[in-house]
Image: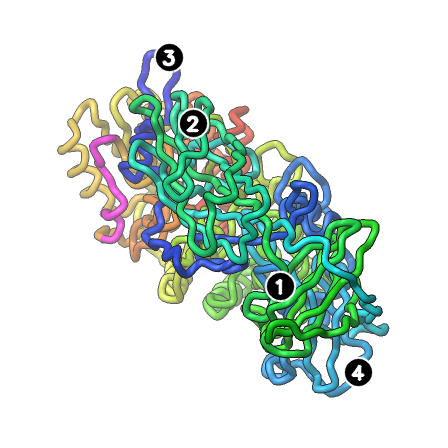
């Protein structure tokens, strides 16, 4: 919490320098890249190296492989567009059909054997003429071979959520599209020995909350300081007769001016110069004899003032590459008016496909030639630039993941449930136990699997935008319309799992506040854009089946227990927050007994002892007002994230945390204090906490009115999810509205 005026801020806000080197609000991968193993098109968990054909100094990969479908992907990541806010009827139809899902994360020609399709439950014998292949609700042509195998051109993706695309194979109602074969023509003497490619490297080692860059990813590569950052790129089939261009993109992380010397194979090629915490791109033309075949070293060294720190966003090299296959595969371009001769294949039977806009146009029936003991072919000239991929059967990769598509129809009116429990398949059994319990108590509940949401609303990707559209549909299309959403799984800012912790079961929406990027579960159900969710939404941030089972048991325990204890509240406050604490106390009904624990009165050590003792008493509600971090109350840690595991309270209270960052629930490596309170055996039944930092003036009216809302004068009951969204109406602070999140079941009634 921050107090305006003479009071200090409540968050322990560190400089970016401190964030980086003390590990606060920054994640670092402990996976050290083995640069010698990097090849074009290979993706590692925190390294991406991609090669693309270039025409007229523009990378086709950067221009977007398919303008229409990739525009959809970009729109899904932007609240300024309307595409993701619309249900695609074609995709709903695809999701409702049995079939197979094929996941690809690189641009290539793929071959899937019949046996692989059969193992995923696909009938490879019947109705072959009606086999259809779709990506992004758009049909793509494929080759169906006599043995039941299929071949197709697939492309990877690059959003904040995923690096892959999902291709759906199913039996359609009409004949499917097939790749046509055209004569390849006869080429004359080649006009050029090479074509332009761009090899781009993007490492992802650090996550920075302090970078405000809109919808772009907040993950970056190596630190650039006076200690050089050294990276490598493997450049293959280099033609040293042409120009070489190096593009460097750096992200400043201090307000200083940045001067970065750039070296290629220990040869100075220039200086990157920019100011402040900006993202800056700069290009350098490199003498063609500086780069060499194989591994090349790139060094970046800051030479500015002592606070000259930046991060590598990416760097790329554009160079001429000879028309020679590598491992019996080559993606290449032929410029307008030129002929080409391709060779280097070690076996005959090369297939050649022309690509345009990220999709295959047709296969070319080329005349195979043998030269210098290798196989190849010639292509005639054309009046326009052309891109191709040539590959032998054995060299065509398979998708990295293949699985059955289980049909789903979430928009059907046959569905019903006031409570929709959103669960990944891993926790579906535990979620169903909770749904059955809720239904038995008069709260109709239905488990909705994240895989089905991805299939119907995310084109196979589970995104925040897909969840948003899904929740809209559940609230208006079900026979009994959803009023409450329970997210039964953890989230993480490491959505692509660079760090390998696997915690992003149900993504949150990453938003920008005035000083940081952080999580907003409320955004997922905020259909009017006022910062207040329109459905009661809560999250139980379980990360494994044990936590899932324990959390369900805890809810059942709370709703079943009959503790004959009078209502009571513990009210804790940091220094200078005593007045606010008093205001909160005044809002409790007369039948409540209250215990105030305040730092100014007790001091840090005594306050901690009092909190730990009082937390074990059977309170109904616990509140805290003051400074905080992701895992602490106050800068003295009067309560920290390790304490909930040791609590012995019998009655489970609701924690109202009016502080900064206690609800920073999307940490990739560990849990926040609010999460640990809810996941502990005792601790809290639910907690309401912020994922960001805001001022006290924007928070206090929410907490004051929440106490009253939870205790209406009329004899009625109010569910927790409804209570917290109503409390948000008492503040105009958009950051407070969007960052306060409910951890727990939104259908609970506090008693």
Q: Position of residue 418 (x, y in %)?
A: 61, 55
Is residue 178 found left or right of 739 in the rendered image? right
- The main secondary structure of the magenta stretch is loop
- Say which label, 3 or 1, has the lower sequence index: 3
Q: Residue at x 59, y 45 (%)?
A: 242
Kindly indicate whether the residue at mark 1 contacts the one at mark 2 (C-beta within 8 angstroms): no
Marks counted in the figure total 4
Which marked residue is nearer to the observer: mark 4 or mark 3?
A: 4
Q: Position of residue 424 (x, y in %)?
A: 51, 63
Mark 2 or 1, closer to the camera: 1
Span shown in magenta: 635-645
Q: Which residue is mark 1?
A: 330
Task: Identify the residue under disc 2.
Answer: 694
Q: By what rule are the colours in the image chosen?
A: rainbow
Task: Give coordinates of residue 652: x percent, y percent.
Answer: 33, 50
Distance Cα–Cα, label 2 vs label 1: 53 Å
| Residue at (78, 58) in percent of width and height | 89
Measure the alpha-carbon separation of dots 4 and 2: 60 Å
Q: Secondary structure at mark 2?
A: loop
Kindly tell me whether residue 381 is visible in this rendering.
yes
Name the residue that disc number 3 marks: 5
Residue 655 seen in render? no
The foreground one among 29 and 434 is 29
Q: Nearer the viewer, mark 3 or mark 1?
A: 1
| Residue at mark 4 | 127
Label drawn at residue 238: none
Q: Looking at the image, is mark 4 or mark 2 nearer the viewer?
A: 4
Q: Earlier in the sequence, mark 4 or mark 3?
A: 3
237 in magenta: no
Residue 45 sits in quarter = bottom left
Question: Disc 4 and disc 3: Cα gap in Å?
Answer: 73 Å
Do residues under tags 3 and 1 come within 8 Å of each other at their CB atoms?
A: no
């Amino acid at each position: 919490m921050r107090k305006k005026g003479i009071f200090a801020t409540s968050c322990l806000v560190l400089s970016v320098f401190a964030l980086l080197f003390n590990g606060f609000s920054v994640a670092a991968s402990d996976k050290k890249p083995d640069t010698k193993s990097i090849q074009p098109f290979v993706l590692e968990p925190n390294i991406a190296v991609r090669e693309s054909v270039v025409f007229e100094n523009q990378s086709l990969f950067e221009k977007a492989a398919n303008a229409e479908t990739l525009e959809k992907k970009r729109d899904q990541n932007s609240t300024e567009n309307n595409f993701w806010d619309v249900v695609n009827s074609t995709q709903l139809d695809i999701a409702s059909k049995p079939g197979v899902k094929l996941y690809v994360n690189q641009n290539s020609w793929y071959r899937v054997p019949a046996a692989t399709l059969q193992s995923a439950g696909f009938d490879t014998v019947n109705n072959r003429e009606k086999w259809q292949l779709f990506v992004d609700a758009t049909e793509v042509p494929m080759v169906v071979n006599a043995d039941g195998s299929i071949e197709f051109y697939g492309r990877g993706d690059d959003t904040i959520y995923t690096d892959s695309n999902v291709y759906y194979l199913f039996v359609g109602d009409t004949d499917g599209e097939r790749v046509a074969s055209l004569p390849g023509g006869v080429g004359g003497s080649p006009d050029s020995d090479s074509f332009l490619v761009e090899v781009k490297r993007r490492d992802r080692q650090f996550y920075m909350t302090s970078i405000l860059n809109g919808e772009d990813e907040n993950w970056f590569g190596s630190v650039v300081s006076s200690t050089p950052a050294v990276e490598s790129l493997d450049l293959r089939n280099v033609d040293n007769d042409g120009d070489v261009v190096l593009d460097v993109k750096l992200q400043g992380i201090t307000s200083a001016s940045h001067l970065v010397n750039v070296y290629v194979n220990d040869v100075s090629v220039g200086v990157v110069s920019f100011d402040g915490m900006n993202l800056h791109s700069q290009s350098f033309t490199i003498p063609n004899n500086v780069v060499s075949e194989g591994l090349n070293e790139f060094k970046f060294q800051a030479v500015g003032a002592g606070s000259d720190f930046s991060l590598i966003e990416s760097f790329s090299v554009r160079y001429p590459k000879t028309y020679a296959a590598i491992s019996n595969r080559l993606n290449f371009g032929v410029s307008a008016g030129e002929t080409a001769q391709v060779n280097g294949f070690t076996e005959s039977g090369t297939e050649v496909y022309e690509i345009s806009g990220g999709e295959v146009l047709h296969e070319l029936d080329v005349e195979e030639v043998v030269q210098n003991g290798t196989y190849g072919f010639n292509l005639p000239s054309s009046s326009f630039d052309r891109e191709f991929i040539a590959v032998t059967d054995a060299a065509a990769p398979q998708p990295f993941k293949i699985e059955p598509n289980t049909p789903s129809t979430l928009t059907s009116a046959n569905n019903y449930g006031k409570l929709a429990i959103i669960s990944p398949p891993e926790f579906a059994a535990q979620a169903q136990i909770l749904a059955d319990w809720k239904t038995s108590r008069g709260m109709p509940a239905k488990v909705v699997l994240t895989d089905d949401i991805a299939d119907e609303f995310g084109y196979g990707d589970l995104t925040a935008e897909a969840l948003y559209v899904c929740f809209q549909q559940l609230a208006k299309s079900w026979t009994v319309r959803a009023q409450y959403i329970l997210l039964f799984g953890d989230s993480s800012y490491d959505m692509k799992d660079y760090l390998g912790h696997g915690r992003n079961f149900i993504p949150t929406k990453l938003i920008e506040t005035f000083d940081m990027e952080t999580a907003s579960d409320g955004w997922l159900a905020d259909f009017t854009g006022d910062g207040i969710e329109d459905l009661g939404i809560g999250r139980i941030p379980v990360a494994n089946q044990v936590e899932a089972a324990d959390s369900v048991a805890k809810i059942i325990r709370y709703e079943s227990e009959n503790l004959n204890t009078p209502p009571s509240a513990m009210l804790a406050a940091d220094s200078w927050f005593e007045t606010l604490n008093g205001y909160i106390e005044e809002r409790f009904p007369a039948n409540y007994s209250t215990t105030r624990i305040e730092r100014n009165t007790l001091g840090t050590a005594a306050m901690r002892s009092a909190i730990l003792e009082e937390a074990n008493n059977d309170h109904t509600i616990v509140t805290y007002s003051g400074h905080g971090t992701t895992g602490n109350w106050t800068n003295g840690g009067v309560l920290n994230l390790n304490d909930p595991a040791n609590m012995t309270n019998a009655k489970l209270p609701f924690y109202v945390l009016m502080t900064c960052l206690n609800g920073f629930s999307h940490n990739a490596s560990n849990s926040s204090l609010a999460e640990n309170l809810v996941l502990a055996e005792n601790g809290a039944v639910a907690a309401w906490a912020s994922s960001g930092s805001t001022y006290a003036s924007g928070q206090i009216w929410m907490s004051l009115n929440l106490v009253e809302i939870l205790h209406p004068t009329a004899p009625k009951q109010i569910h927790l999810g409804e209570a917290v969204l109503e409390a948000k109406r008492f503040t105009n602070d958009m950051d407070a509205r969007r960052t306060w999140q409910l951890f727990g079941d939104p259908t609970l009634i506090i008693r």
